[in-house]
Image (cartoon, grey):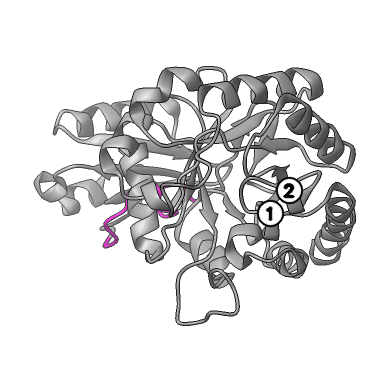
Amino acid sequence: MIAVLKHGTTPQQVNHLVNWLKQMNLDVHLSEGTQVTVLGLIGDTSRVDMDLLKSLEIVETVKRVSEPFKQANRKFHPLDSVIACGDVPIGGGHFAMIAGPCSVESEEQIIEVAQAVKASGANILRGGAFKPRTSPYAFQGMKGEGIRLLLKAKEATKMPIVTEIMNISTLDLFADVDVIQVGARNMQNFDLLKELGKTNKPILLKRGLANTLQELLMSAEYIMSEGNENVILCERGIRTFETATRNTLDLSAVSVLHNLSHLPVVVDPSHATGKASLVAPMAYAAAAANADGIMIEVHNNPSCALCDGPQSLTPAQFDDLNRRVRKVREAIL
């Protein structure tokens, strides 16, 4: 349920109403804009007398929210959320270019790639330390050592870093990581999501291979319901009958998610297409769709990469891509 308050309502009136609602064992989410203040009521709202609430002098309208996701819902939070990733904001008109290798392989590799992508305009460094792989025999990442090397690259470039968590038991290793990524395979690992909800770190939540957008938002709700509102959604392609690409990039998801939710939406064309030659066109399309950020895999020697080399761009290719993405954004804004 949401209650929209009248323009000119004083902070004292808002606090009085919020306290009254909390006495009904409801959580109250307050969203204050320049023209409108919205109270989102979470819990058993059946005990709320809608007619009584509507009759209050400071209340403009009261509506029930039919969608099962509440805190991620734009009705609860009309303005775009801006998530601070280190010193880099995402959302609300702030665009992030996230780039780096699929997997951290060595100190020389990660620092070389980090310096290259930063020089080309990237503002967040990505790199895998824990790697979920389909085959148990494939490279699984450098784990804790990989995070240590990512932090060295962060120190060398001053870029915030994002890397994927596989198991909550390793959370202590992520103490100095700026953004924790939840991969597609863990999108509905609800125990993991709830534990991440108890942190205050930004969480980059990737859509599962065969999950609907409502399921993605419900996973975000798991994190937010525990108190962490710093969630970034990521469209990375879904599994369809098409075999020409690794996955099918659902760019309509950007607009749909922006309509349904206030959370930022990032697009990962590297995992979606699985082919380096297709990454740039899909990145341009994502920028044209008004994504809040793009995540690109970049490797200094893709043919020798230990993970996902076929979809990785060289630093020179990334430089060209980033330059063209900026032009696309200039054209649509």
Residue found 86% across the figure and 60% down from its top: 330
**What's the amino acid at mark 1?**
Gly
Residue labelled with disc 1 = 309
Span shown in magenta: 66-78
In magenta segment, residue 77:
yes
Q: Residues within 10 Å of mark 1 (few under 14, many from 20)?
A: many
**What's the amino acid at mark 2?**
Cys
Let me know if residue 84 appears in the view.
Answer: yes
Let me know if residue 95 appears in the view.
Answer: no
Q: Residue furthest bottom?
A: 241
Q: Which quadrant is home to the C terminus?
A: bottom right
Residue labelled with disc 2 = 304
Residue found 72% across the figure and 23% down from its top: 154
- 91 vs 133, left or right, is right
Q: Residue furthest left?
A: 47
Residue found 34% across the figure and 49% down from its top: 219
- 188 vs 100, left or right, is left
Q: Residues within 10 Å of mark 2 (few under 14, many from 20)?
A: few
Residue found 78% across the figure and 33% down from its top: 114
Closest to the observer: 74 or 202?
202
Overall secondary structure of the magenta section: loop
- 59 vs 180, left or right, is left
Q: Residue furthest front?
A: 137
Counting residues from the start of the chain, the first of labels 2 and 1 encountered is 2
Label 1 secondary element:
helix
| Residue 291 screen position, x and y as percent | 65, 58
In the depicted structure, whether residue 156 falls above or below residue 202 = above
